[in-house]
Image (cartoon, helix red, strand yellow):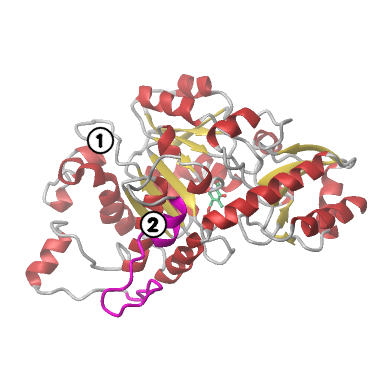
Amino acid sequence: MKKLHPEYGFNTLAVHSGTAPDPTTGARSFPIYQTTAYVFDDADHAASLFNLQEPGFIYSRLTNPTVAALEEKLATLEGGRGGTVTSSGHAAETLALFPLMAPGMEVIVADKLYGGTINLMGKSYQKFGWNAVFVDTDNPEAFRKAVTEKTRAIFIENLANPGGVVVDLEAIAKVAEEAGVPLIVDNTMATPFLCQPFEWGADLVVHSTTKFLSGQGNAVGGVVIDSGKFPWLGNSKFPSLSAPSPEYNGLTFAETFGDLAYTMYSHAISLRDLGCTQSPMNAWITLNGIETLPLRMERHCSNGLAVAKFLEKQANVEWVSFAGLESSPYFELGKKYLPEGTGSVFTFGVKGGYESGLKMLEAVKLFSHVANIGDTRSLILHPASTTHRQLTEEQRIAAGAGQEVIRLSIGIECVEDIISDLDQALNCL
Ligand SMILES: *Cc1c(COP(=O)(O)O)cnc(C)c1O
């Protein structure tokens, strides 16, 4: 793991970064700044804030101290330059593309993705005139072949949903670099504890913080983190960042803000106009959740591996897709990119297809049947009848969510209890 800080390691930063004691009150838990607006010192102060000549708080759609603390913590843990927290993971995906895209432009997208992302990019983006070009996740050459003059970004999911797919980050980052466009990695499933995509050449990272980062299934949120390394300056492909902005007195983001250009644009324009801001309350919940991320991820990973090994041996189970198993085609990539563990969200196929899938959901007792992942609790889902329901059968199979597929998100309970619940449920089929 790259050294994120001259003095402190990851676990220390997970607890402390972004959340120093409150200088006014001494409060040790970071306060929830539940306010909409901030008093200006005088008219000049207000003007310079609005002109982006001075940093400070104006209105909580753009910035808020609790949300800013979360931005700092997440940017630190990913080894990035700046972050923009959003109301949800989906909002983060759109916000990540907003400074880059324009009508008629293309984003190359891996085909193994969270089902909602396939809908968002494949269908809704057409309304903006943004074209998502889907390519085979497992083939970096397919990404290279899809590059055109109109390509403005490449988007992939690390440890892809719904089941145990490890993407060749370094190879795809090389394609993006040669194409002169940023690589955006959805790092929701791995979290920065297991993998930091910037280390492998990614330019932007997005998360649904709803999952492992907040960690307890109680706050929807997202974030976009910028590495600060992409060369926007003078780059005619990205006029939002490289051309003068009339609404801010003709300033050019890349020139004025340097390696913070993308993050400044995301607050001053993307959040200002799209308004997909996170509430201070949710930011506070997520800040607290992240403090225990390393501990939870260790347990999630060890429980996940033990459950996958158990399932692999069961007669009612056709296959298990978990990158930590030696039988997985992603085992070697997993060792390279996720040496500490390959997460706890994965799929397996039950014998008997759709019917058995539904029976399994009814038979489990400890597992909750929910459309979420990354909770302390163990969760179960049948993607074909829920999250991937709106896709065609062909898209479902491409996304690893066919009729017989069950998705598990293994929690941090006693592993023997999790296994015995699955054991009794499999015996009911
Ligand atoms: C859940 C999820 C999303 C969407 O995030 P929301 O917070 O639900 O909007 C995006 N990507 C991945 C990998 C996810 O798991």
- Residue at 85%, 39% (x, y): give it: 313
Residue 330 visible somewhere in the drawing: no
Query: Horizontal and vertical percent for residue 242?
Result: 21, 37
**Magenta residues, start to end:** 10-35
Is residue 238 within the magenta segment?
Answer: no
Residue 122 visible somewhere in the drawing: yes
Query: Horizontal and vertical percent for residue 110?
Result: 54, 33
Amino acid type, residue under disc 2 in the picture:
Lys
Horizontal relation, residue 222 to residue 237: left or right: right
Is residue 27 within the magenta segment?
Answer: yes
Q: Which mark is residue 232?
A: 1
Q: Which mark is residue 216?
A: none
Horizontal relation, residue 309 to residue 151: left or right: right
The residue singled out by tag 2 in the image is 73
- Secondary structure of the residue carrying numbered label 1: loop
> Label 2 to label 1, Cα distance in Å?
25 Å
